[in-house]
Amino acid sequence: MHGGPTTAVVRGPAGESVVLFSGELPEVLTDTSVAELLDLAAAILDADELVLFHQCLQTLRRNGMRAGRRIERGGAVLTVYEG
């Protein structure tokens, strides 16, 4: 992903999955960046969570990745923050 080796997928304090990466938000998610994120996420997400995460990433690809974007799929929420 855009942040390269500093990208991480972790569990937050409440057990929620959190994707962290350095640098500015990319305007477009490419096939390569999505594949890299899915590979990282596979380390901590179960199969169902991984499917939901992939669906959220596909929505971000179509609609753009910007701060404040909130995607909900099957009860899972993906929110993009910039800080």
Image (cartoon, rainbow, N blue to C red):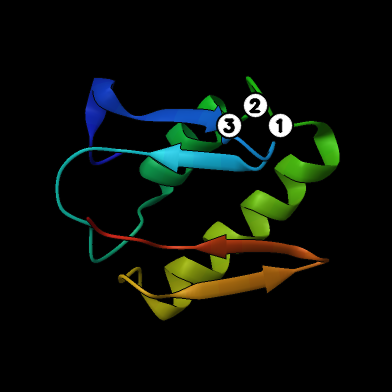
Label 2: how many residues lie within 10 Å, few (<14), some (14-19) or many (20+)?
some
Residue for badge 2: 42
From this view, report whether residue 21 is shown above or below residue 57.
above
Q: Amino acid at mark 3?
A: Ala
Quadrant where the N terminus is found in the figure: top left
Q: Amino acid at mark 1?
A: Leu
Question: Residue visible at 84% across and 43% down?
Answer: 48
Residue for badge 3: 41
Question: Residue visible at 46% across and 45% down?
Answer: 34
Residue 50 % position (x, y): 72, 41
Q: Quadrant of residue 22?
A: top left
Residue for badge 1: 45
SS type, badge 2: loop
Determine the residue located farthest toward the bottom in the rendered image. Answer: 63
SS type, badge 3: helix
Quadrant where the C terminus is found in the figure: bottom left
Q: Amino acid at mark 2?
A: Ala
Q: Nearer the viewer, mark 1 or mark 2?
A: 1
- Whether tag 1 and tag 3 are in contact, CB under 8 A, the answer is yes
